[in-house]
């Protein structure tokens, strides 16, 4: 019986702190995908550099990470998508950016490249001429009405394109196309020092700017084998949890707006604004953009900061029971129960974590197991099994409560000392993670004498959109906006 | 007069004066109001977060007569966020084409103003001004809600003159 463990046992390794990265031959790579699918291991990310393709797997059972690579030197590598559907979007992205073709892939259409760039495969050693804009070839069921949505969507939404086949009000099929907000972030990060590149990591996704910055900083620190000082670590925890509370309040409010619950919506909006003003006082930026740097945090918390934050937390704590009651009342709960139901097995197989995963029974939160700095606070993680919009709203309310406790604990017992450490321009490879408002973000990078040789940030969006396609099937077209808001579907973070 | 005879032609002078009065009344009543359509041309969603804050009771955008609409067809103002990605240039041009005259384009946030940190990327053209004429810029990364509000109110004042 070939298992993941036996396949990687004899493979040559490279150091990818804090783990090892196993270099697999093409046949071993394919058997590993099959073994991973049988054992229920989850594909977290699939990415490339100019020579190789890398994959990151998570074993839920014993919370271990397996990083593997295979050669793409001849311009191709064996596809993972036939056995791991979660790989499909990644394979399309890898082809668009590096030009490596996934042999035997289920889908090789463009993803990020819409034929509008002046070159193709911008991350390859030798980029090619521009590609023709590809025609969306869809398997549209006969007689179905096709409803295209986006890329410019509802007010204040991110750019995404959804193509729906309808039978009356019912959605038969949903297909997503992203890449509209592709900004060439990886090319901009490459060749720069982590200090400069952090500005791009912070702008991958505005509502997860702290999480992406922390994951990027942790990957850098892992590669350099240094650790941020205790005071910076505690401040990072406070920032990450503030971001989670603000993000959850935003989503709660958006879902309430779409479910026509104006009271809940305005309460959430007001509380969120109070918190953002407090983080402006404490950290000098409302969204805490650029506040996390490699080796620590950009600046110490301002003197009136802790007081301002604790006051905002008090406001939130006092109004949260009211918001929960509104969600329990029939007017709102009858609108949310059963809407956008995501099955647990599906969510797990697509590697969906975060609120969307935990509402469907996937008990994974990277704060427990992969972020040792959290261990002294012991974050409590709740799991629901209904998998619908109502369950997700309730989980968000629970997570806000828990984050309030964590922020209070982190700020209440702030260690003294410096907030950054000095860094040397060394070479190395590292992986870092952080739990964002939507799930875990993973950053991988390789440093060459202090400069970024290769980098990849994996946003939770990769799994979430695959899940959304399946959740939308058999939903009612009128619920699209509600489902989108409830799953908190992102675009920019995975458009790179 | 028989009921089938054609109606008398209207007096052109009366028509003109009535039209002028109607225009004036409309301008007085509706001139201090702007319908805004937000267009994301590659934003990281930070600007959208701050736009959403404008709806809270603390800013209460609508008391100034500013409101967000769903379609460019109903908009006076296109509020553009994000660096202009090559993949969204056509979408921005289409949205502007669908907006009735007179139309204003506001570039909000450093990215929409000149591409921000993403300037020079193979996938980014620069600010919104590369594709469409921009009437007002609001700087910041992202601009705070109070700054956005101040910018939009300038437009309101200019419009009501």
Image (cartoon, coloured by chain):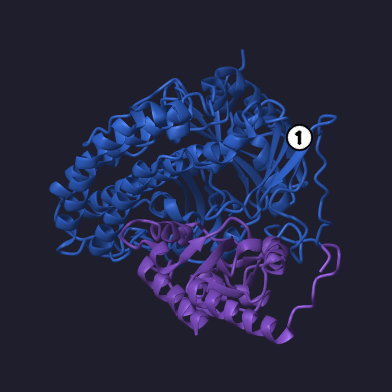
Question: Which color is chain B depicted in?
Answer: purple
Rendered location of residue A226, percent (x, y): 33, 53
Instruction: Name the quadrant containing residue B12.
Output: bottom right
In this rendering, the answer to whether A383 lies above or below B73 is above
Q: Give the residue displayed 62% in from the left and 28% down from the top.
A: A475
Q: Is residue A198 above or below residue A69?
A: below
Q: Quadrant of residue A382?
A: top left
Up-down relation of residue A60 to residue B147 (above or below): above
- Which quarter shows the C terminus of chain A? bottom right
Residue A369 in view of the camera: no
Q: Position of residue A320 (x, y in %)?
A: 26, 38
Chain identifier for the blue-coloured part of the image: A
Front position in the image: A332 or A85: A332
Q: Position of residue A411 (x, y in %)?
A: 18, 49
> Does residue A108 appear to the left or right of A437 in the view shown?
right
Question: Can I make out residue B87 in this image?
Answer: yes
């Amino acid at each position: 019986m070939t298992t993941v463990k036996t396949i990687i046992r004899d493979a040559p390794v490279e150091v990818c702190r804090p783990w090892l990265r196993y270099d697999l031959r093409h046949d071993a790579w394919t058997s590993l995908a099959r073994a991973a699918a049988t054992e229920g291991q989850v594909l977290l990310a699939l990415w490339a550099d100019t020579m190789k393709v890398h994959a990151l797997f998570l074993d839920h059972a014993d919370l271990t990470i397996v990083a593997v690579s295979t050669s793409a030197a001849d311009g191709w590598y064996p596809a993972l998508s036939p056995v791991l559907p979660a790989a499909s979007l990644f394979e399309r992205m890898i082809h668009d950016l590096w030009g490596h073709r996934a042999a035997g892939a289920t889908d090789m259409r463009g993803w990020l490249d819409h034929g509008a760039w002046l070159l193709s495969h911008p991350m390859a050693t030798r980029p090619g001429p521009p590609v023709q804009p590809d025609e969306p070839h869809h398997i549209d069921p006969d007689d179905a009405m096709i409803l295209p949505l986006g890329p410019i969507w509802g007010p204040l939404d991110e750019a995404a394109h959804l193509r729906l086949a309808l039978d009356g009000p019912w959605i038969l099929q949903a297909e997503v196309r992203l890449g509209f907000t592709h900004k060439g972030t990886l090319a901009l990060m490459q060749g720069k020092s982590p200090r400069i590149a952090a500005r791009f990591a912070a702008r991958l996704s505005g509502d997860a700017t702290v999480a992406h910055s922390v994951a990027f900083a942790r990957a850098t620190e892992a590669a350099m084998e240094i650790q941020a000082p205790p005071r910076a670590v505690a401040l990072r925890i406070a920032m990450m949890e503030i971001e989670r509370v603000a993000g959850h309040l935003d989503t709660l409010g958006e879902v309430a707006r779409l479910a026509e619950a104006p009271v809940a919506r305005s309460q959430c909006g007001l509380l969120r604004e109070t918190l953002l003003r407090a983080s402006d006082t404490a950290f000098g930026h409302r969204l805490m953009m650029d506040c996390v740097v490699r080796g620590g945090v950009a600046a110490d918390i301002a003197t009136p900061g802790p007081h301002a934050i604790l006051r905002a937390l008090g406001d939130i704590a006092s109004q949260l029971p009211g918001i929960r009651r509104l969600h329990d009342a029939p007017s709102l709960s009858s609108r949310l129960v059963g809407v956008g139901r995501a099955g647990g097995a599906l969510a797990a197989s697509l590697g969906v974590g975060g609120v969307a995963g935990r509402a469907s029974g996937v008990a994974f939160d990277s704060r427990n197991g992969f972020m040792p700095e959290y261990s002294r606070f012991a974050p409590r993680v709740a799991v629901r099994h209904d998998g619908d919009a109502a369950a997700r709203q309730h989980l968000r309310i629970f997570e806000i409560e828990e984050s309030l406790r964590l922020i209070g604990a982190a700020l209440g017992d702030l260690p003294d000392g410096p907030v950054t450490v000095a860094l040397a321009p060394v070479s190395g490879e590292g992986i870092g993670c952080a739990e964002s408002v939507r799930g875990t973000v993973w950053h991988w990078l390789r440093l060459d004498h202090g400069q970024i040789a290769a980098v990849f940030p994996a946003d939770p969006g990769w799994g979430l959109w695959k899940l959304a396609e399946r959740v939308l099937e058999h939903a009612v077209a009128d619920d699209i906006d509600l489902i989108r808001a409830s799953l908190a579907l992102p675009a920019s973070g995975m458009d790179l | 007069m028989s009921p089938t005879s054609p109606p008398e032609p209207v007096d052109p002078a009366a028509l003109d004066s009535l039209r002028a009065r109607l225009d004036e009344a409309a301008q007085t009543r509706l001139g201090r109001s702007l319908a805004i359509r937000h267009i994301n041309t590659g934003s990281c969603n930070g600007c959208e977060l701050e736009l959403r804050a404008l709806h809270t009771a603390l800013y209460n955008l609508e008391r100034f007569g500013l409101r967000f609409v769903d379609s460019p067809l109903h908009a006076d103002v296109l509020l553009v966020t994000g660096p202009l990605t090559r993949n969204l240039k056509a979408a921005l041009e289409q949205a502007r084409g669908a907006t009735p005259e007179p139309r204003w384009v506001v570039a909000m946030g450093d990215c929409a103003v000149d591409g921000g940190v993403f300037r020079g990327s193979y996938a980014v053209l620069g600010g919104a001004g590369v594709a469409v004429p921009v009437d007002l810029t609001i700087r910041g990364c992202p601009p705070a809600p109070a700054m956005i509000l101040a910018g939009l109110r300038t437009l309101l004042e200019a419009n009501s003159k």
